[in-house]
Image (tube, coloured by chain):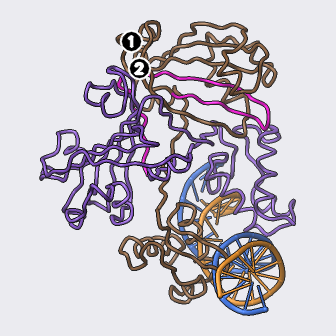
Chain colours: A brown, B purple, C orange, D blue
Amino acid sequence: MTGWQDIEAEVLRRIHARDWPPGSAIPHEAALAVEFGVARATVNRALQSLAEAGWLDRRRKAGTRVALHPVRKATLVIPIIRAEIEATERVYGYRLLDRRMAVPQDHVARHLRLVTPLLHVAALHMADAAPYAHEDRWINPGAVPQVMAVDLSVDNANEWLVANAPFTHGDYAIAAVTASAQMALQVGADHGTALVTVERSTWNGEVPITWVRLTFAPGHRIRAAF
Amino acid sequence: MTGWQDIEAEVLRRIHARDWPPGSAIPHEAALAVEFGVARATVNRALQSLAEAGWLDRRRKAGTRVALHPVRKATLVIPIIRAEIEATERVYGYRLLDRRMAVPQDHVARHLRLVTPLLHVAALHMADAAPYAHEDRWINPGAVPQVMAVDLSVDNANEWLVANAPFTHGDYAIAAVTASAQMALQVGADHGTALVTVERSTWNGEVPITWVRLTFAPGHRIRAAF
DNA sequence: TAGTGGTCTAGACCACCAA
DNA sequence: TGGTGGTCTAGACCACTAC
């Protein structure tokens, strides 16, 4: 009846109720284990979960304290664009705009720490035949040589890479840009409209895989909950 | 020598190395426990961690499989603006622009499910005396009556609420807007510039606490790693 | 219904670090 | 240096669900 999630909920209740105000120390694990009538490992599991969520600060010997600034974290899911569109009952569409080997622009080269020619891909993702997002991508063929043989007018790079290019980590940046004349045309916006962009790069250890900038159609919102 | 994090690393290595390709089943906990020479609980800890990170799909009876689409999650830290600015060695500044009771705009009222008058606050956050972000906030005095007595020209609402208004959850939306003439003036942009906005609402159980929209100065980027 | 993951226990030892 | 959290173990029972 008393699982670690019950204990987590009760501790969180006490934090919210200010029984244990921010900055204060809470009883140590052994004491809570006695109070709740469970093994210490069970309390430990609950408190670790709360610490990971940012509610508690735990240090050996110093004990456990309620976080002063509950640093909440919102989790952004990095989606497959097709899935994101189909989740809202719309029909996904895709069109390849460009595919060529080229030396990357400075900011891409610097970010990926590569100056060799890369595979450049431009494409458009559509929802119910309306533009959804423009994709501007550079792929490192040194990391995924097989990509050169893929017909990217059929398989889109987004999905092919997810399925075929393992990565260990990456980074993510969201910004706002004013639509250029060309981009306005692509995403169905008026010239000068503000658009959301997401830039992402992924790595496999020290090897850069790809850099991509998605420019979304006007009105796009990136949502998260916490 | 063999802790759960070592096992996590080894499993992740096998996933990256395609020893266990996406979609394939991996050995069950008991088998891995034997292979690594540890207790099943230790293997369980490692696999749970990987499942939470999105690398594995686990279901009772069905076993554990490598995720087909490694749904990576980027973690957005929700910052105290002062801390964000001071982290880059700049001097934080704050100016209250407006404070009054008012009936909220439609979209705010709908979002918070409240039609009563709320406390409206407008303020400017600065970094080294340059505009950093404009804050447009509505606070529910029914949830935090003490806020009415706070001198918001000294204590900024952002920090006061974090320290004094416990919340259980919230939501988050990022968008791009074209700077209005007035907003352009506030954040030091040209009229028509694209600006990043972040809208956030927080709740304490069923009780809405506050809705806020931050409009950042031109060029602002929201970053995350994964 | 049986196989798999989810969790609990009681005890133990260790790592860290504030006092 | 002692108190605290971090982790491991061996065993157990339970919950879920594919078959």
Residue linked to disc 1:
A188
The answer to which image quadrant residue B185 occupies is top left
Q: Is residue B115 left or right of residue B43?
A: left
For the stretch drawn in magenta, the main secondary structure is: strand
Rendered image quadrant of residue B41: bottom right
Q: Residues within 10 Å of mark 2 (few under 14, many from 20)?
A: many
Chain ID for label 2?
A
Please state the horizontal and vertical placement of residue B34, each as a whole percent of the image.
85, 63
Left-right relation of B143 to A99: left
How crowded pointer 1 is (Cα within 10 Å; few <14, some 14-19, many 20+) is rated as: some
Q: Which amino acid, by three-letter code, is at mark 1?
A: Gly
Residue, x 55% and y 89% (percent of image)? A34
Q: Position of residue B78 (x, y in %)?
A: 46, 50
Mark 2 or 1, nearer chain start:
1
Amino acid identity at mark 2: Ala
- Residue B10 in the image: above or below residue D6: above
For the residues labelled 2 and 1, say whether their Cβ atoms are less than 8 Å apart. yes
Image quarter in which the C terminus of chain B is found? top right
Q: Which residues make up the magenta segment?
A: A198-226
Foreground residue among A89 and B226: B226
The furthest residue to the front = B129
Q: Are marks 2 and 1 on the same chain?
A: yes
The chain under label 1 reads: A
Is A203 within the magenta? yes
The circle on residue A217 is 2
- Answer whether residue B110 is magenta in the image: no
State the image quarter where residue A205 is shown: top right
Nearer to the camera, B183 or A120: B183
From the viewer's perspective, tell me whether residue B18 is left or right of residue B157: right
Residue B116 percent location from the top left of the image: 12, 53
* Quadrant that contains the N terminus of chain B: bottom right
* B30 to A114, vertically: above or below: below
